[in-house]
Image (tube, grey):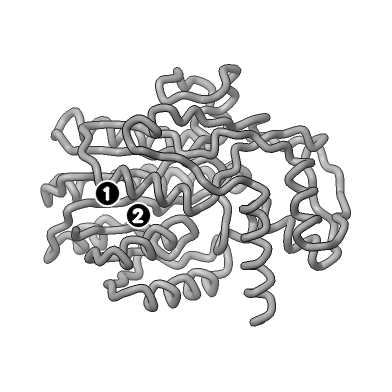
Amino acid sequence: MRILLTGGAGFIASHLAERLLRDGHSLVIVDDFNDFYDPKLKRESIEVLRRAGKFDLVEGDIRNSSLVDSLFANRKFDQVVHLAARAGVRPSIKDPQLYVDTNVTGTLNLLEAARRARAPKFVLGSTSSVYGVNSKVPFSEDDAILHSISPYAATKLCAEQLCHNYHHLYGMEVVIPRFFTVYGPRQRPEMAIHKFTQAVFRGEPIERYGDGSMRRDFTYVSDIVDGVHAAMQRNFQFEIFNLGDSNTVELKYLIGLIEKAVGKKAKIKQLPEQPGDVPITYANIDKARRLLGYEPKVKIEEGIERFVRWYKGRRAKE
């Protein structure tokens, strides 16, 4: 297949790109290498991909409609896999306009270009954050989403709605995987598992918000890639899929696993709960099991060990 992958130097997308390249697909990656976190980490991911296969890299911003149009000018794509986004709840509260510009306008630019180019399939990476404060657990794709609580969640929900518009109006095939707290090698450094691991290694305090009872459905990145890959291989009209481990892990237990893997005790700096944080994420994955054959394989205990091994290896090279 000929695939346009946005955000391909980022965490999840680079793992997907590695899989697609090893499968022999033709790949164009677009990424703006912004400074949300050290662009050096994204450059390292690109070097990993260069060892997996040949691809075209376009450095640019999806907010630029002219650049997006140019991606389609001389190429015919079978699928657009849109994983570029401004991510994170707390940063979105500080700069909501940036999140609207990237996650909403950027998505619209891609949808318009894909429509004009008659690209047959559009895959949008979304997030469990759209469920917000949901008293019904586990979260299901057909739940009414009425209480998102951060600009990040609101922009991703808006992007989902735009995709549905383009399916309804123009017959575009659309698949939307909602990711649940993804972790693994190359994870963004501001995310909890990466940040906590680094703090324990350095003997620095972990900033723990709330009493440690917050629960997350942590999902290893290879399981997410399996789910997205399966969605790319099958034909749908418009479908949304939860991709999670379907198992909740308490924050206190997570920190204990990191302590064990690192071999050092964590120092805890207790802080109040943060605006925008939800108390629990928990995926009902019955639909993904039924229609995608999705079955997460890496449990949190093994996943943390894998992540810490990767972190140690990268640290040894610095």
At x 60%, y 48%, the residue is 91
Return the x and y of residue 261 as percentages of the image width and height. 75, 59
Along the horizontal axis of the image, is 182 left or right of 274? Answer: left
User: Is the C terminus in the top left, top right, bottom left or bottom right quadrant?
Assistant: bottom right
The numbered mark, 1 or 2, whose residue comes first in the sequence reads 2
At x 38%, y 65%, the residue is 18
Query: Please, is residue 181 above or below residue 133 in the view?
Result: below
Q: Residue 156 lies in what quarter of the image?
A: top left
Along the horizontal axis of the image, is 83 left or right of 166? Answer: right
Q: Which mark is residue 63?
A: 2
Return the x and y of residue 73 as percentages of the image width and height. 13, 62
Residue 290 showing in the rendered view: yes
User: Is the N terminus in the top left, top right, bottom left or bottom right quadrant?
Assistant: bottom left
Q: Secondary structure at mark 2?
A: loop
Q: Which mark is residue 187?
A: none
Q: Are marks 1 and 2 in contact (CB under 8 Å)?
A: yes
Return the x and y of residue 86 as percentages of the image width and height. 48, 51
Residue placed under numbered mark 1 in the picture: 109
Residue type marked 1: Asn
Along the horizontal axis of the image, is 63 left or right of 299? Answer: left
Q: Nearer the viewer, residue 19 or 135?
A: 19
At x 49%, y 20%, the residue is 146
Q: Residues within 10 Å of mark 1 (few under 14, many from 20)?
A: many
Q: Residue 47 lies in what quarter of the image?
A: bottom left
- Count of all numbered marks drawn on residues in the image: 2
Return the x and y of residue 16 as percentages of the image width and height. 39, 58
